[in-house]
Amino acid sequence: MIKLFTRLVSTQSRSIINVQQFNIMCSTKTNECINMYKAFAQTPALQSARINADQSIISVWSQRNIEKGKTTKFMKNHVLKQDGKFCDFFPCDISDEVISTISPSEKLRAVVRDMENGKGNIQYLEIWEAGSLMQSIDLTNLDLHGKVYADGEFASFEFSPSENKLLFVAERKVDKATAINLRPKDKEGDGFRSMEYEQDWGEQLVGKVYPMLVIYDLQKDKFELLDAIPRDVSIAQPIWGSDDRSIFGMAYSNKPRKLGLIYCTNRTSSIFSLDLVNEEYKELPLPGKSVKSPRISPDGGKLVWLQRNDGGAHNDCMSLVQAKLPLAGDNTDITVIIDVVEKEVKIAEGKSFYGFYTPKLPTRCWTQDGRIAVNTNQKNTVNSYLVNLESKEITEMEYTNGSQLVLDVRGTKLLMNRRSFFQRDELVSINLNDCSVTQVVASKRLQNSENYMWEYLELEQENGDEIRDFTAIYLGPKSAESKIPLIVWPHGGPHSAYANNLFLEGCFFLSQGYGMVLINYRGSIGAGAASVKFLLGRVGRSDVDDCVLATKTVLNRYPYLDEKRVALVGGSHGGFLVTHLSGQYPDMFHAVVARNPVIDIASMSITSDIPDWCYVESGMEYTQVGEIDEDILLKMRKCSPIMHVHKVKAPTLLQIGTKDLRVPPSQGIEYHHRLRSNNIITKLNLYDDNHPLGTVPNEMDNIISTAMWLSEHLNKA
């Protein structure tokens, strides 16, 4: 009998599916899965919000647009009525806006807009005044610099205090490559063309090589490229001082090499000041430090930022630091307001606090009485706090039904985003004078959420480890008439954490009848710096042990979970863990889905944009100086999942991004080949995407593929 194969091809992914699998995918259940995904994909996510002087509010939201295959971004205006309630108007699509800002007086709005034409992508700078377009400039045609930055690592977009100037970050224009011609009469463009290698800043920052400061003078209609900054420095997150004469920000060194920045708070950096009148650039001497998110006080007398030691874990606990202005040029005026928390400290009202892990302060973070608003992970939630810079007192803005983030501060008013596993983003306004809460945008709960539950689990290993406790979250039905399958889902990083937020995959798999255990193993953020550091040198062991304990705990705690239908799902370091678990515990798990998993740390150490991660997580100091130490490579290999691939039994689906610079596709491809060589059922889907597989078509494909893989292979278990 001849086996028939059907090839499904799209511009986003490639996979080969046999007739049986094709029929499954075309079944009624598959259509129900697709429709369910589409329903959840319509959920808008709150990105930012701002309180205006007249107490009206502007909010910006994003939503997946499946038909376009892109994310739609839209803006809403909310007006406070006489009865104290807010009403809002129809949203305005702002998807083509790259970055925008409103001037201090709120008389001007600046926008950088991306537009497509027959020649490609064009960027325009627009200045709006009193409801009309004041200025529109074709930045691409002007050709003074490259693309304007809008990322979370480097970007800034600010009017000066006088509102006469606009500050932003753009790619420095570089000379084009030249060709070496064989003959003098060769036509232009002939010959051998080469280009000097220039390293960019890695995963999701491709093409960002030399960020530079640009000022647009609105009165003179003139651009100024600030060349006072050394060429071996990459500036980031610049802000205006108290007048138009000074700029502050972060400075990264480009030497000896650039290491990937996305998800990494450990890169050596400092605070810089730039005197525009004297063209004088200075850096604070902060040796061995990494800084983030500088913010200037409303009176111009203080500069605060987040700071930690450089190197080490890629997302560790940070301190809140303050310096008086003008900067002294040394460390004499720098004060640590809130230091790194090793395990736990008590704050106002006797609450437990585990330190700051956020890499970013709200853009407007100062209350009228001079306190700072900060958001950060705390075990299983994201919490918001107010910090008194004088007394150093920390006050939690309590919210018990999930997570809460401060989005904007104006005087005594705070705008907050409240969310949970079962609750869409809710925008509320809080008055600090009387702690009253006004709902701006009401939340909508997940359909049938009354049938589901979450439970925070405090777990502890019974051994002699210095750090033994960690947490997990059970998410699933409250009860079931028959046994239901369980998904074991460790997070990536490894130094990140699950928090009580609505997320599409969780909603989707709840609707499909799964229970889930989300594991914040030792090494996760939000539980003290000591827990973060504990994992270094123990990857593949202690994190694996924690996943096993969490799995056994929920199977014992919720008797309706089926121990014969336990699946593993995870991406990045989560993929590292699920491939470890399926190899080390082959009889415990019955189906695996791994997205861009770390498989062999040794080989990844020379292909990733963050090779230091491979050293640090394996328990060693990163260096490229001197002779290569073979023992280091061997240690990396021994703590990798590839050491256990020959023991795997569970059918394994691999979802791999061909443009992934963080965990290169060769990792998953090699694992796929080894599984096939050992006669294990496996499938590899390739996506034209980077590490998160985050584009709308790819996200839809990998979630539906995951659902179908688990449905097929767990039902065989």
Image (cartoon, helix red, strand yellow):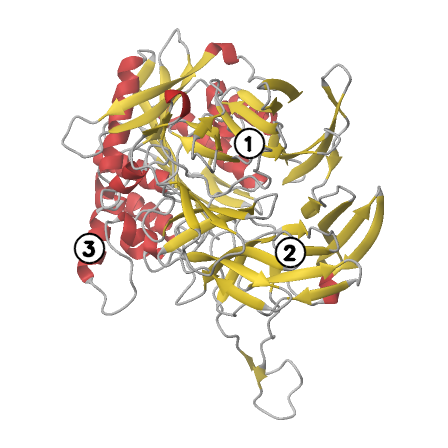
292 w.r.t. 466: above or below: below
How far across and down, in percent of the image, does residue 276 sit?
A: 63, 64
Identified by mark 1, the residue type is Val
Which labelled disc corresponds to residue 85?
none
How far across and down, in percent of the image, does residue 102 sit?
A: 71, 44
| Image-based side of 638 in relation to 352, left or right | left
Identified by mark 2, the residue type is Phe
Residue occupying the point 32% across, 17% down: 562
Residue 83 visible in this rendered orientation of the protein: yes
Which labelled disc corresponds to residue 406?
1
Front position in the image: 183 or 640: 640
Identified by mark 3, the residue type is Leu
- Say which quarter of the image contains residue 586: top left
Residue occupying the far bottom of the picture:
184
Front position in the image: 117 or 290: 290
| Image-based side of 544 in relation to 519, left or right | left
Residue occupying the far top of the picture:
481
Q: Which mark is first along the chain, 1 or 2?
A: 2
Residue occupying the point 61% across, 54% down: 149
Which labelled disc corresponds to residue 634?
3
563 w.r.t. 702: above or below: above
Front position in the image: 435 or 359: 435
Front position in the image: 259 or 633: 259
According to the picture, the residue beneath numbered tag 2 turns out to be 168
